[in-house]
Image (cartoon, helix red, strand yellow):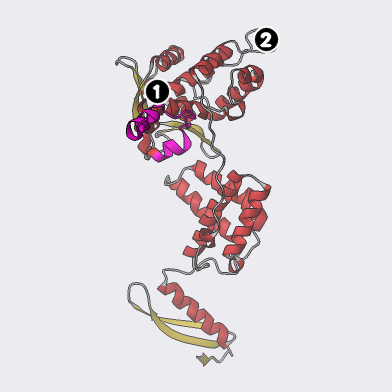
Amino acid sequence: MTRLASGRYQARGSTRDDSGALRRLRASADSEEAARADLLRQAKALSTGGSSTLSPKSTIADVVELWLSQILTRANTGSLSFSTYESYETTARVIIVPRCGGVRLEQLTVGRCDRILQKILEEETISKARRARAVLSLVCGYAVRDDALDRNPVRDVQRLPTAPRKESALSTAQIIGIRELMEQWRVTRDDGPRPNYRALVDGMEIMLGTSIRIGECLGLRRCDVDMTTLPPTLVVNGTIVSNKTQGTHRKDSPKRARQRRNIALPSMAAAAVRRRLALAEPDPEAFLFPTNTGRTMSVSNYERLLRSFINDERTELVALGVAVDEYTTHIYRRTAATLIERAAGITLASRLLGHASEQITRNSYVVTAEQVDPLTAEILDDVLGT
């Protein structure tokens, strides 16, 4: 340490960078402590590949801002979907920052994280609390990588409960009844054009016959179906997504890229596909569920149409025994999985749904039968005697 003629202090030193090269350093400041601190900062930057942006004094809001900019970069480069980025951004902006954005990283203990998440669970929903936990963990992970946190405190908080599992599936009689209601929906009303009931019927029958999701159904094009084979087939190789950046468009892979698959069509679904082909443009890329302009129908518009039908026909649906509060397009996928599992086992049902694990199919899609197979009685009789 030397004092210059100007009265400032100058610190000198040397260190080796990541390549092993010796680097000589020099720092000047108004005090010895400041000059030494600046020299140490330079040395740290050379030995760690760069200086960190965050510090233990940084707030969660500071980390969120930097983390989201990194996530947006990944979306722009195609390694992450814009829908995922927007989901993260909404959770951070609406849930996390208003509740704990001012907390400094040095104050972010396991206990504090746990209390934050439990408060969200008490005042919001299980779904929001679980999303908040996931995003807060990602934010803290970013802070760890930037050397502002020693470890991720969210990893040690208590597990949040899972949302109640939906247990409803449609019976054959209910499917027939729903189809009849859809075909007669608002047929006698004169307060405007009749809703697109045909899209509701055809979409339901295709989803029931293939177990595909609503986005995958709306993403079907003329070139994705082959009605010349026996039985006819369709290929699941895309889905409809919507986000603020790209609008509504077709993504050329299902929800998961590994879920590309060819599915044989039962007669009900094949008939629905033929009706859609008769309405579609001759272009091979033409959508089977187009708008008036030839673009694909969005998932939100289809679901809005279904909700309007349910609201109008609620009394009749309840009379059919349909669990109206659980009636979304996902009930079709759950119904298909349940029917296949009961007839042919979980392995075939899992393959139809495109799942990587049979456990996913069993936990989330197959409705457990209340009646145990009477074969168990026969087996026990043989073993135990009468």
On screen, 148 above or below 244?
below
Q: Which residue is mark 2?
A: 189
The residue furthest right is: 191
Q: Residues within 10 Å of mark 2 (few under 14, many from 20)?
A: few
User: Residue 313: x, y in percent?
Assistant: 64, 18
Comparing 334 with 50, the one in front is: 334
On screen, 312 above or below 108?
above
Q: Which residue is mark 1?
A: 285
Query: Which type of secondary structure does the marked residue at label 2 adopt?
Result: loop
Going by the numbered disc 1, the residue's amino acid type is: Glu
Q: Is residue 249 magenta?
A: no
User: Residue 356: x, y in percent?
Assistant: 37, 39
Comparing 216 with 360, the one in front is: 360
Going by the numbered disc 2, the residue's amino acid type is: Arg
Numbered circles on residues, count: 2
Comparing 205 with 375, the one in front is: 375
User: Residue 336: x, y in percent?
Assistant: 44, 25
- Which quadrant is home to the C terminus? top left
On screen, 64 above or below 91?
below
Disc 2 and disc 1: Cα gap in Å? 35 Å
Q: Is residue 60 visible?
A: no
User: Residue 253: x, y in percent?
Assistant: 39, 34
In the displayed structure image, the side of residue 190 where residue 170 appears, left or right: left
Q: Which residues fall within the magenta stretch?
A: 359-386
Mark on residue 132? Answer: none
The residue furthest left is: 229
The residue at the point 50 percent across, 49 percent down is 72
Comparing 3 with 60, the one in front is: 60
